[in-house]
Image: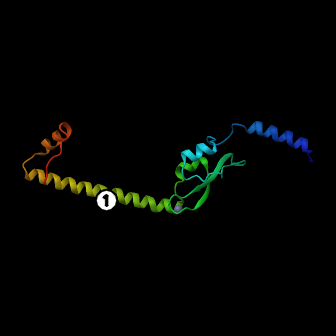
């Protein structure tokens, strides 16, 4: 069926009205996106008609690779998939190391204080009440 230009325009207006508000995710302006997501590449915001989503380019914070993502996924698109894997491995390792280091330090301090004749209860009380540095030369 052939459509005149006028009919096509009228149908477009009809469809736009029917689809208005049927968007996935909140629509944000260029400025809002840039303020909220530093890894968003300004000027790349577009509307994906079929997906009913806003999309834009994000730049990986680690390797600089660019990729298009739905703006609703920007919060989890700071890194590209490859870098995300690497970063999360490093973060987990760092957390483990920190806990180990903290535990080691704690054990050493307790031993030092025990040697000086200060009980663990006194240490806890001193930390809570006085907040003064405890000498552990
Ligand atoms: Zn990357």
**Depth check, front residue: 44 or 115:** 44
Quarter of the image for residue 26 reads: top right
Q: Residue at x 31, y 59 (%)?
A: 97
Residue 67 location in percent, x, y? 61, 58
Q: Residues within 10 Å of mark 1 (few under 14, many from 20)?
A: few
Position of residue 18 relative to residue 64, above or below, is: above
Quarter of the image for residue 18 reads: top right
Residue 55 location in percent, x, y? 65, 50
Q: How is the image coloured?
A: rainbow
Q: Residue at x 33, y 57 (%)?
A: 96
Q: Residue at x 77, y 39 (%)?
A: 16
Q: Which residue is mark 1?
A: 97
Horizontal relation, residue 59 to residue 110: left or right? right
Residue 42 location in percent, x, y? 62, 51
Position of residue 92 relative to residue 35, above or below, is: below
Under circle 1, the secondary element is helix
Ligand 1 is within 8 Å of the C-beta of the residue at disc 1: no
Horizontal relation, residue 99 to residue 84: left or right? left
Q: Residue at x 40, y 61 (%)?
A: 90
Q: Quadrant of the C terminus?
A: bottom left
Residue 22 location in percent, x, y? 69, 39
Horizontal relation, residue 85 to residue 112: left or right? right
**Depth check, front residue: 133 or 17:** 133
How many numbered marks appear?
1
């Amino acid at each position: 069926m052939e459509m005149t230009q006028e009919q096509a325009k009228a149908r477009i207006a009809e469809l736009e009205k029917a689809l208005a508000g049927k968007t996935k995710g909140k629509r944000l302006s260029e400025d809002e996106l840039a303020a909220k997501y530093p890894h968003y590449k300004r000027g790349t915001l577009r509307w994906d008609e079929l997906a009913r989503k806003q999309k834009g380019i994000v730049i990986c914070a680690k390797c600089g690779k660019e990729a298009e993502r739905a703006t609703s996924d920007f919060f989890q698109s700071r890194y590209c998939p490859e870098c995300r894997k690497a970063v999360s491995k490093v973060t987990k390792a760092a957390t483990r190391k920190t806990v180990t280091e903290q535990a080691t330090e704690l054990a050493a301090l307790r031993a030092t204080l025990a040697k000086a004749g200060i009980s663990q209860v006194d240490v806890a009380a001193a930390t809570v009440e006085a907040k003064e540095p405890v000498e552990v030369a």
